[in-house]
Amino acid sequence: MGALGLPPGHEATDAYAVKVAKILAESAGSSVRVSGTKTRGAQGKGQGTMARRVAKGAGRPRSVASACRECGVVLEEPERQYCQDCVPTLNRERTRKLLTAGRNVLAEMRASPDDPARSAAAVAKRVATNAERRKTALEWEKRNPGPHDREVFRTEILPGLQKVTLPQMMRATGLTSGYCWRLKRGERTPHPVYWKQLRDLGAQVQGLLELAVSQDTATADVENRL
């Protein structure tokens, strides 16, 4: 038998095959070893080791630059999906979608005969709460006769509520989250009995935010201090 296990008389073919293999290995651009006709691999005793040595990193996938999914700008950090300019807009859009979904769910619950807000216990609690609030408002009006200009709330108090969270407003006034949301958006004007609590809350939050900035403290700590 000749080289590469060919029958006698095929040595020329064997040498030609090795030559072609070397040409292909050189064109591959990596360290591929091709055994000659006299090597152990060429005699069929070590063919499993042929072309085993490859340049380091030749088989590793190259990192591909990622782009912002919103505007397409190339990102310096491959693990990011959006650029800094698009993140605020995306956050606002996500909040809008969450609010819309929440309102839709609430509307479906209210339209359902099994709405928990329509239970006897819920109705009784709501009636008692409204009666207590009305009583508090009437007592306040006796001590603080009007008239009370609504523009005072809109121009002096409402701006300070923009950095106040709904839970903070609810704790300060005892009002519901839905009503506090409308107050913050300027869709409702609360009874003057709540003006002082809201004014003080806005000033307190503003002061804590300024202190957090001066001390390089996380803004989330403001919520924990109230």
Image: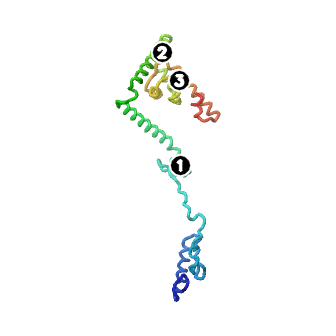
Query: Which residue is at 60% across, 30% downward?
Result: 210
Estimate the x, y position of residue 53 in percent, counting from the top left.
Answer: 60, 70
Query: Tag 2: residue type?
Result: Thr
Q: Badges 3 and 1: C-beta atoms under 8 Å apart?
A: no
Estimate the x, y position of residue 104 in percent, counting from the top left.
Answer: 39, 35
Q: Earlier in the sequence, mark 1 or mark 2?
A: 1
Residue behind mark 1: 80
Q: Does residue 138 appear to the left or right of 29 in the view shown?
A: left
Q: Secondary structure at mark 2?
A: helix
How packed mark 1 is, by other alpha carbons closer than 10 Å (few <14, some 14-19, many 20 or more), is few
Q: Which one is in front in this view, the residue at disc 1 or the one at disc 2?
A: 2
Q: Does residue 218 appear to the left or right of 105 in the view shown?
A: right
Q: Which residue, as the protein is rendered here, is positioned at the far right?
A: 215
What number is the disc on residue 136? 2
User: Distance from label 3 to label 2 (Cα)?
Assistant: 15 Å
User: Distance from label 3 to label 1 (Cα)?
Assistant: 39 Å
Q: Which image quadrant for residue 189? A: top left
Q: Earlier in the sequence, mark 3 or mark 2?
A: 2
User: In the rendered view of the protein, which quadrant contains the C terminus?
Assistant: top right
Report how many numbered discs are placed on residues in the image: 3
Please state which of residues 9 and 94 is positioned toward the viewer in this rendering: 9
Residue 125, compared with residue 46, is above or below; it is above
Residue behind mark 3: 172
Query: Which residue is at 36% across, 30% downward?
Result: 114
User: Distance from label 1 to label 2 (Cα)?
Assistant: 53 Å
Estimate the x, y position of residue 161 in percent, counting from the top left.
Answer: 51, 27
How packed mark 3 is, by other alpha carbons closer than 10 Å (few <14, some 14-19, many 20 or more), is some
Q: Secondary structure at mark 1?
A: loop
Q: Which residue, as the protein is rendered here, is positioned at the far bottom?
A: 9
